[in-house]
Image (spheres, rainbow, N blue to C red):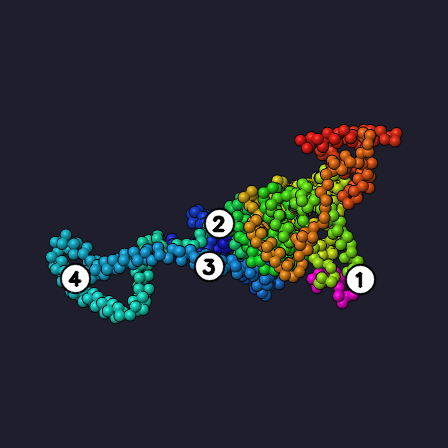
Amino acid sequence: MRINGTTPEPMADVFRLPLPSATPDPDTIPQTAQPIEDATAQETAPQMQDTSYAVALDEPEQETGDTSTGPVLTGTVLPPAGDDTTTEGARRPIIPPVFRDRVTFKAAVRKLVGRWLHITGYHAVRAPWYAVKMTGYALLGAAKLAGKQVRWWWLLEQEPLRQAAASKGDADLWLKLHREAARVRTGRGLAVLGEAALIGAGGVFVAGSPWAVAGAVAVVVPLLARYGRPAGLSIVGHAVIPSRYRVITHDVVLRAYYAAGLGHPDKPQQQVQFAAPGLAADGDGSKVTVDLPYGKGFNDVIKAKDALASGLDVAISQVFVTRDATSHRRHTLWVANRDPLAVPVGRTPLLRCKPTDIWEPAPVGMDERGRAVTVPLLWNSTMVGAQPRQGKTFFARLLALYAALDPYVRLSVFDASGKPDWRKFALVAHQFSSGLVMTRDGDPVEILIEALRELKADVQDRYQRLSDLPTDVCPEGKLTREIARDPSYGMPVRGVFLDEFQEYYDTPDAEANKEIASLLLFLVKTAPAAGVFMVDATQKPSGIGAGQVATSFNSFRDNHQTRFSLRTGSWQVSDLVLGAGAYGEGLDSSLLLPSYKGVGILRGASDDTPTVRSHLADAEDAEKILTAARELRERTGTLSGHAAGDRTARQVRDVLADVHAMFLPGEGFLPWQELAARLADKLPASYGDLTAEAISAQVRSFGVPSVNGKRDGQVLKGAKHDAITDALKTRST
């Protein structure tokens, strides 16, 4: 979108710039976005002079006539170039935002350098072809110049006059013209001979020096090639394809709002108005702060977004509206020149494998305006939600990779799905499990429960120890960088990452589900303030399980401070991921296109709620980064737990065989309560905290039925000895 150019509906002369007088030369087209000219603009301009939608911003009697802020027309102030401030009374930044933020500045420099490196490489590869084209055009130019010189020498422009005199039979005039032509040809012939002599002398002069020859060729050949180049063709191609876009002006914006039913140009108090400083260029697009008519609000704009995009004649993915804090009927409209979400931002900067600092926010990508976006991990819990195969795991892993490159962060990684995406984190993780099926390291559910218990105890202990530290060491009773990195305190920053966490609420063990739900809820509410942050990903934010487990799931989901939602199936699911009220603010991840991989809405990380195009880190990138992260931890002496080989020893028990051994000779039935008690007594290391429900679920998973039986005069649920024997025989075969 551009502010200048041809407007479909001219507002007034002050807004209308002159049309180009001729078709631009292809070589002079800059390698930037080019506007699509409205084909009807010139035809309709005279008839539409009186159809402008311009209205006064205030009542006439309230106008002061002060034009010190810029040209004023019907209450709309044209902005200075590059102005980013739209809030009345706000102070414009002394230092441009791109120079105030290190991450943004580095991203801008990388983008600029990358662009010019691409252009340089593109033209370097094609340089031989350019040389061939230039030589051919130079020869053509030399021929054209020689022909023009011959025509000038022979006075060919006089030929029609002599022909006309001959046709009329005017011999005197013909002879007069002939004598004049002979005289002029003689003089011009001498001039041509002089030119040829000078060119020959110059050739002889430069022939003795290779540098002089090269200089002459470097000057003469491009000039001749330029002269000989056929119209419409260029010597050098475009390394970056120019974008075509719709010109956005004040009248176009007004037309769109009125077409969307957000006001009426002729009804009192129903005109759409612009807040100062009006329409302005902003990044790769245009923005304007709009005041809706009284009675209309931000929710009306959200509902009419489709119609608004149609009125602007752009795709809906190019239209972004942001609530304004000063008034409910005021908002900021930003219209992109092209679909900003379809442009990937490339590989993660973490591939440099440099140490990171968890006290600084993690770079995750760029927003729709090309600005760097970061997510603060410390002191926060972050939830990532989306449909399958939209980039949910990639985004969560991106945050984990950032944390891994800080060697002082202790990681706990649990992937319920067992995907390969997280396997390499075993190189650096203090606690790690993958899937829900028994592994060499033990039962992943048990590993998770033990880790969560340890985390809960650590958090409780931290609060006590931090409160006991002197104020000169711990001024605010909070974890500091110095305390976290001093091994004598034993309080490193910890990061807990759970992928597909909903699966941990629905394991076959009901008691385990309850304990996991309780521990996770405690941690998400309490742990971040103790320096234990959480990043949790799910494809089922609507909930799972029943009763207390389902309630705990919802509470766990709703207690995340930062939310990132990639594409979802509906606005209701989007609201569950982004938090209640997100849809009312115009945030709906269900509108994201299926082709937008790694694109989502980030809420809660800052005052803004950007739509983020996340960086890419595939499996190969992740392995490279994690290998470097392990080396960093080995050098700093912070490699611990699972990554250091200090795994908790777990004897993999044969549950069926252990249960079978609990039957005394002659016993044909044992209730689950008694089985659990005997196992805990005989094998406390493996079954010390076993419940009747847990052993029932494990045994029944092998096909052993739970039946009624009498024990001490009571009818209890349990297992028969014969059924367990049969299950053992079936498994062995």
Rendered location of residue 720, percent (x, y): 78, 30
- Marks 3 and 1, how far apart at CA: 57 Å
Three-letter code for the amino acid on which mark 3 is drawn: Trp
Q: Between residue 207 and residue 271, name the one nearer to us.
A: 207
- Marks 1 and 4, how far apart at CA: 111 Å
Q: Which residues are magenta?
A: 467-485
Q: Is residue 519 left or right of residue 536?
A: right
Q: Residue at x 61, y 40 (%)?
A: 569
Three-letter code for the amino acid on which mark 1 is drawn: Asp
- Marks 2 and 3, how far apart at CA: 26 Å
Residue under circle 2? 246
Secondary structure of the residue carrying tag 2 is strand
Three-letter code for the amino acid on which mark 2 is drawn: Arg
Q: Residue at x 44, y 46 (%)?
A: 40
Please tell me in which quadrant of the rendered image residue 58 appears.
bottom right
Residue under circle 4? 181
Query: Disc 3 vs disc 1: which is toward the camera?
Result: 1
Query: Disc 1 vs disc 4: which is toward the camera?
Result: 1
Secondary structure of the residue carrying tag 3 is helix
Residue under circle 1? 468
Secondary structure of the residue carrying tag 4 is helix
> Can see residue 437?
yes
- Marks 1 and 2, how far apart at CA: 64 Å
Query: Disc 4 vs disc 3: which is toward the camera?
Result: 3
Rendered location of residue 384, percent (x, y): 64, 47
> Can see residue 412?
no
Neighbours of disc 1 within 10 Å: few (<14), some (14-19), many (20+): few
Rendered location of residue 410, percent (x, y): 68, 55
